[in-house]
Amino acid sequence: MAMKERTVKRTAQPLVVKNLNLSIGGTPILKNINLELPAHKITCIVGPSGCGKSTLLKTLNRLTDMTDDVHIEGSVLLGDQDIIKASGVELIELRRRIGLVPQQPTPLPMSIYDNVAYGRRIHKLSRAGRQMHKSVLRYLNAVGLVTEVKGKLHSSASRLSIGQQQRLCLARSLAVEPEYILADEATSALDPISSRTVEDLFVKLKEDYSIIMVTHTLSQAQRIADYVVFIYMGEVVETGTADQVFNHPQHELTQNYLKGIFS
C-alpha cells in the first residue's frame, strides 16, 4: 500500500467552521457550530442518532445542497475559500479538494478501472493511455485492491464484495487528489474484517490526507481517532484529542454519553 507515487503535495490547511447554523424547512439542525478540524489527523464526529453528525459532515462539501428547503448561515473555510459562498466552477473544485466516502458503497455502473479513472478524466488529472493506467493502479494499490482485482480491471464493479466496493469508492475519492476525505459511517455496512481493513487504511492514509469520519461506534473512534467532536442535539458539546475526550471528558453530557446512559 505504498503512497510514494503521489504527484501532488497536499497542503496542511485546517478546515475551519465559524458560527455555522443550518435549518431544514425552518427546523434547526445545526446550531452555532465553531470548529477547527486539524489537518493530517483522523477526526471522529460522535454523538447519538439524529444529533446532526451526518448533516455537519455533508455541509463541509455542500452535499446539503441536495436537500430541499435548506438554509445555511456562517462559514466553512478551507484556506481563504469559504465553501458556503462557493458556486459554479469554484464549488466543483472545492468538492474535489474535499471528497466523500458514503455509508453505503456506491460504485458507478461501470468497470473497476473506469470507477477510478472517471474523476481523473473529469478533472483532467491524467492523460488517456499509459499515464491513466498507472494512476488507476496507484490508487487501487493505495486501498489494497490492486492484487485482488488483477485481471479483472474491466469487469463490472458491482461484482466486487461489499467490502471491496467500499475500498473502490475510497480509491475513486483518492484519485481526484483531495486534501480532505469525509467518511459518513463508512464501515457500518461492512463485515468486521472489512471494517478493520478500512480502519487500517484510514490510519495509513492520514499521512497524506486529512480524514473526518462520522461514526456511531465509540470503540471504532477509540481505536483510530486523533481528534474527537461530540455533538448533541445539533450543538458541539466537547472537542479535543481522543485522550482528552475519552479519558478526561469535561462535560457531564459527554460523560453520560460515554457511559452509555443515552445513545
Image (spheres, rainbow, N blue to C red):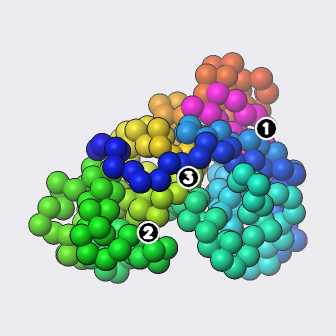
Q: Secondary structure at mark 3?
A: loop
Expressed as whole percent of the image width and height from the top left, the position of residue 58 reads: 65, 62
Over which residues does the magenta segment extend?
Answer: 226-241
Q: Name the residue that disc number 1 marks.
A: 237
**Residue designated by label 3:** 179
Residue 239 in magenta stretch? yes
Q: Amino acid at mark 3?
A: Glu
- Name the spot of residue 21 as percent of width and height, x first: 85, 58
Question: What is the quadrant of the N terminus in the image?
Answer: top left
How much space separates mark 1 and mark 2, taking CA atoms? 41 Å
Disc 3 versus disc 2: nearer the observer: 2
Look at the image and tell me in which quarter the C terminus lies: top right
Amino acid carrying mark 1 in the image:
Val
Mark 1 burial class by Cα count in 10 Å: few <14, some 14-19, many 20+:
some
Which residue is pictured at 22% across the width and 56% down the height?
146
In this figure, which residue is indicated by the disc labeled 2? 125
In this rendering, the label closer to the viewer, 1 or 3: 3
- Residue at 67%, 71% (x, y): give it: 91
